[in-house]
Image: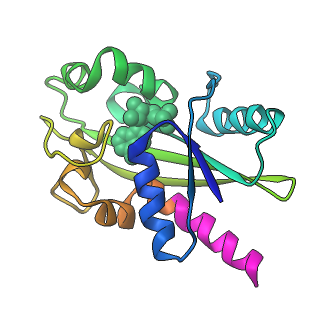
Amino acid sequence: MKIITSNPGKYEEYHKFFEKMGLPIEWIRMKYPELQADTTEEVVIESLNYLISKGYRDFIVDDSGIFIDALNGFPGVYSSYVYKTIGLGGILKLLDGEKNRGAKFVTVIGLELEGNTHLFVGEVRGTINFKPQGENGFGYDPIFIPEGHSRTFAEMSIEEKNSISHRGRAMNKLKEFLIKKMI
Ligand code: IMP
């Protein structure tokens, strides 16, 4: 199994998860064109088709985003662009004085295996903190506190984040699928 991503933080989470399962995952560190679409699922389908057209097989891709309730789901599929432009400070400014801090993270994993493609979706709800906290993780991790917890993802280890995160949930679905295939 290979993961195609340019993001070392994502790779680390996959590596830790699949290492535990005894299934080594190979990292193809590469950027590929990400088509803009209305949903994360559509982005992943386009990415799978693009990479398949380039000859890649037996691989996964991951597209994720943060959807903030008070901003009607923004930045959602624009999460990457918004992170690079206004960043965490910009998001916190948009939420200045906002009492509704609810948000969710979504990961869609796209898998190509034996000529077929499959999607695995994971979500986690939580709240946007009032300031960035923590040094671990990447992206929006310093401002996201998952439901039922009092620390941001950036204050957790990879193992702890994986055990509750959007990506962890999507990876669990992928794992179930792979286990069924092996039996
Ligand atoms: P993409 O999945 O690479 O398109 O990511 C979209 C944006 O969300 C990027 O700015 C990522 O850094 C960020 N992001 C993706 N996954 C996570 C996560 O698990 N935690 C925090 N930020 C994330």
Image colouring: rainbow
Q: Residue at 61% of width from left, 33% of height from top?
A: 39
- Residue found 13% across the figure and 24% down from its top: 97
Q: Residue furthest top?
A: 85
Q: Is residue 42 magenta?
A: no
Magenta part, dominant SS: helix
User: Where in the figure is residue 56, as x and y percent of width and height?
Assistant: 76, 43
**Residue 95: quadrant of the picture:** top left
Above or below, comparing residue 51 to residue 146 in the picture: above
Ligand 1 in which quarter: top left
| Viewer-side residue, 15 vs 98 | 15
Horizontally, is 85 left or right of 48 in the view? left
Q: Is residue 141 left or right of residue 58?
A: left
Magenta stretch: residue 173 in it?
yes
In this view of the protein, can residue 128 be seen by the observer? no
| Residue 1 to residue 87: above or below | below
Question: In the image shown, does 128 or 167 lie closer to the viewer?
Answer: 167
Q: In the rendered view, tell whether residue 111 sits above or below residue 53.
A: below
Residue extent of the magenta highlight: 170-183
Percent coordinates x, y for residue 86 in the rendering: 29, 16
- Disc count in the image? 0
In which quadrant is the C terminus drawn?
bottom right
Does 55 sit left or right of 32 as displayed?
A: right
Q: Nearer the viewer, residue 42 or 52?
A: 52
Image location of residue 38, percent across then percent down:
62, 26
Q: Please tell me which residue is depicted at 54% across the width and 67% down the height of the picture.
A: 172
Q: Residue at x 60, y 70 (%)?
A: 175
| Figure quadrant of the N terminus | bottom right
Task: Give residue 127's position: percent from left, percent from top.
Answer: 26, 45
Is residue 150 among what the camera can see? Answer: yes
- Residue furthest to the bottom in view is 183
